Amino acid sequence: MSDLTLFLDLLSQPCRSVYIFAKANNIPFNYYEVLLFKGGQMSDDFGKVNPLRKVPALKDGDFTMGESTAMLQYLAQKYKTPDHWYPADLQKRARVDEYLAWQHTNTRPHAARVFWIKGMTPYLLGHEATPEKLNPALCEFNATMTTLQDTFLQNKQFLAGEEISIADLVAIVEIMQPSAVGVDVFEDKPKLSAWKQRVVEAIGADLFNEAHATILKVKEMQNQPVPPELKERLKARLELFTR
């Protein structure tokens, strides 16, 4: 049995990046499911692994950590994955790190805001999001996608070069979040659309689809009851996105 355990909920985009990376690189791990919508992150056992109570989390023997991008870097180096994922060359690696630093305040929050406003408003409040709430989020997200295409991707095959890296993996899982609630992310962005197809092919369509199966059924899941305490926490988070 592997000493490595990954604590995941594949509804979470950072969890999907870690899951896909480990699977694509045949890294042996134990899968521990933490169901966010059932409050699994609040359990005492999980709190011992990640006191911040966020997924993904990693336990490697006695070593524990959170933060998905740091986990990807850790796994790439510990398991000596193919160099293109996180290059040894300083400048090539810097390009990967550059995107990972940028996405924390761009791709990730802007995609998440669209997902929450468009997808979670009906679930938590019982009505569709108003244009006054949704349209500014869509404009912000579309501007981010234009920057992703024109500044990071440009005419390259992938975001940091001619081979896939963890930068592409981190990007695609975030972009799939708005896609799951019906946003046409790639409309009028042919370069970005072609990039997505290359990412899927590099990962493998079966693995990509497996990792995204849950989030692509998120509307079906919204018929399931959610504990009242968790629902109030989710409403509070939705309020943050709609301010």
Image (spheres, rainbow, N blue to C red):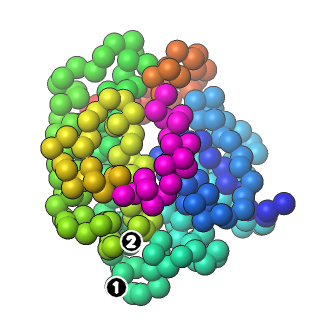
Is 203 contained in the magenta span? yes
Along the viewing direction, whichever of 199 and 121 lies nearer the viewer: 199
The residue pinned by badge 1 equals 91
Q: Position of residue 77 (x, y in %)?
A: 58, 77
Residue 172 is labelled as none
Which residue in the rendered view is the most extreme toward the top? 126
Say whether residue 207 is left or right of residue 3: left
Residue visible at 41% across and 87% down? 89
Say whether residue 194 is left or right of residue 2: left
**In this picture, which residue range is highlighted in magenta?**
198-217
Give the foreground label among 1 and 2: 2
Amino acid type of disc 1? Gln
Q: Position of residue 60 (x, y in %)?
A: 73, 65
Is 241 contained in the magenta span? no
The residue pinned by badge 2 equals 163
Looking at the image, is mark 1 or mark 2 earlier in the sequence?
1
Amino acid type of disc 2? Glu
